[in-house]
Image (tube, rainbow, N blue to C red):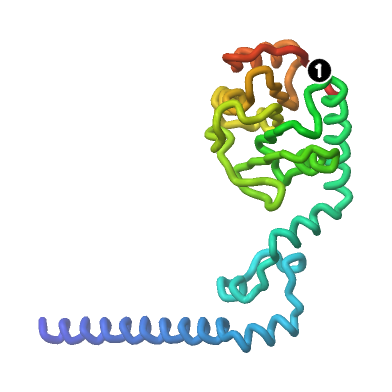
Amino acid sequence: MEDHVERLLNRISLCFAAIATLSLLHLFSRSSFSCDPSLLHRRNQSQSLTLTLSPFPSSSCEAASRDIIPPEKRFHKLRSTHAFQRRVQSFSSLFLSFRSLGILSNSSHVLCVSAGAGHEVAALQDSGVVDVTGVEVIDFPPLVKRADPHNLPFFDGVFDLGFSTGFAAALFPRRFVEEIERTVRNAGVTVLAVDGWEPKNGVEHVEKLFKTSSIVEHERLR
């Protein structure tokens, strides 16, 4: 009786092993077929796949077969959009007021923290400012480099003006302010554009975060 049960279990194990082997062979054959360069090339030609029409590849093989868009081409495409231009224009108007206050000139060394896609960097460069550095957690060449806003990779006091619209989204606001304040020289200026803050309580809260600076002026933008 025991021998009969053992033989039955062995046969069941062999069946499962055979099924598993056939499944693996099936998967390998499909992978080899889908990853064949000539087949992928023909399929891409017939379907005319682009990053715009098919942003998420259906497989790793399909993703590997796609052409990589150079950062310069990606930036040129984005900068040509009306949305990008409108945001750059809004920053240009803001920076024009900085010039009238005497805190910005073409020779200023400017740091833009949490610069996103680099709208403010583009606005400053378009206005004639030569030395502009934009940083963000995710880089966006050629305007924005990758850097942690809570641990900026710059020496102390190397910038004349520190600017950021990302304070409200900072994970550690105190550290965020400390790093900007550290990298701006003595007698330099830091400007934070903060959304959704009450004029009085918001300013008092931000002011307490600065250790070696004092607020000279605050304004509610419309």
Residue 103 in the figure: left or right of residue 153: right
Q: Horizontal and vertical percent for residue 172?
A: 55, 28
Residue drawn at x 75%, y 80% is 47
Answer yes or no: is residue 87 visible.
Answer: no
Q: Nearer the viewer, residue 158 or 170?
A: 158
172 in relation to 54, above or below: above
Say how many tags the image has: 1
Q: Looking at the rendering, in which quadrant would you find the C terminus? A: top right
Identify the residue at the far front of this view.
107
Answer yes or no: is residue 158 visible.
Answer: yes
Q: Identify the image quadrant of residue 182.
A: top right
19 in relation to 69, above or below: below
Q: Looking at the rendering, in which quadrant would you find the N terminus? A: bottom left
Identify the residue at the far left of this view.
2
- Please rate how many residues cluster around mark 1, counting C-alpha atoms within 10 Å: few if below 14, some from 14 to 19, many from 20: few
Residue position for label 1: 219
Q: Nearer the viewer, residue 69 or 141?
A: 141
Q: Identify the image quadrant of residue 181.
A: top right
Residue 69 in the figure: left or right of residue 156: right
Residue drawn at x 63%, y 14% is 213
Residue drawn at x 42%, y 82% is 23
Residue type, numbered disc 1 = Glu
Q: Horizontal and vertical percent for residue 192?
A: 71, 25
- Mark 1 residue element: loop
Q: Horizontal and vertical percent for residue 131?
A: 72, 39
Q: Identify the image quadrant of residue 101.
A: top right
Q: Nearer the viewer, residue 72 or 131?
A: 131
48 in relation to 138, above or below: below
Residue drawn at x 69%, y 87% is 42
Residue 206 in the figure: left or right of residue 107: left
